[in-house]
Image (spheres, grey):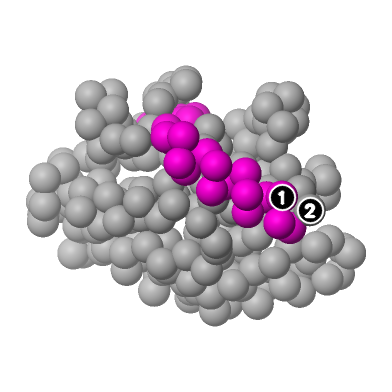
Amino acid sequence: MTAYFYWDQMWRTDEGRADWSTPHPWVVASVEPLRDRGVRDVLDLGCGIGRHSLYLAAEGFAVRAVDRSDAAVAHVRTEAAGHGLAVAVDVADVTDLPCPTASVDLVLAFNVVYHADEVALGRALAEVRRVLRPGGLYQSTMLSKRNAQYGRGVEVSPNTFVQPEAEDDKVHPHLYVDAADLVRLHRGFELLNGFDAEQSAPGSYHWHCLFEAAGNVGEARTGTAEREERGA
């Protein structure tokens, strides 16, 4: 996943950060249902400048965040300190997370993991499964094949396109999916709900999904033991 090269530059300026400081309404609307599920420990995957990390920490969740961008991580640390919020944030790749196995209740990946092809997505999802407790939740967005950008540029891998002349992050790979692809690519997860909707501009269709991680008895016992050891 190379799109962080573009976003690292965006996060270094006030202008680049301007449109990314407010939590998305879908994430805001998820807070009470997450509480009802007993979610406490949250990992914000590809946190950017922290619009969701900071919001969820303010709502009382224990939040850890990661991003490949040095500028993003520095900004989140500054904002968290300025608002008295405890957010543990690290520079890390989504395919190599600095988190113990079975240590979080929710992984949030908002507009992140589709900056890849199917192989790289699989590696990221394997890490998501590893860090989630059995029965944990994975809340994510994926680019829809209804998106206006689908099919534009050069197809470098199945359903994965780059636009060499683009002036934004679309010079990097973007993966697009339909409903069948979602199920196929998320083996080891159960899709609890999902909808395909525009996010902002006309034609900006994204899947908004909530998955539950599958787990066998051995995995459940490991997660429970680790939780008890740290006094959870």
Give the residue pinned by disc 1.
Answer: 228
Q: Residue at x 89, y 64 (%)?
A: 84
x, y percent for residue 14: 65, 70
Q: Nearer the viewer, residue 132 or 68?
A: 132
Q: Is residue 60 above or below residue 75?
A: above
Q: Is residue 111 left or right of residue 105?
A: left
**Quick one: 89 or 38, which is closer to the camera?**
38
**Is there a contact, CB below 8 Å, between mark 1 and mark 2?**
yes
Does 152 appear above or below 177?
Answer: below
Instruction: Name the element at disc 1.
Output: helix
Q: Is residue 204 visible?
A: no
Residues shaded magenta? 204-230
Split into 4 quadrants, where in the image is the N terminus? bottom left
Q: Amino acid at mark 2?
A: Gly
The percent position of residue 229, horizontal first and vertical second, equals 71, 56
Other residues around mark 2 within 10 Å, as few (<14) / some (14–19) / many (≥20): few
In the rendered image, residue 54, in percent from the top left (x then y), is placed at 74, 55
| Quarter where residue 170 is shown | bottom left
Q: Residue at x 36, y 48 (%)?
A: 125
Q: As displayed, is residue 6 above or below residue 204?
A: below
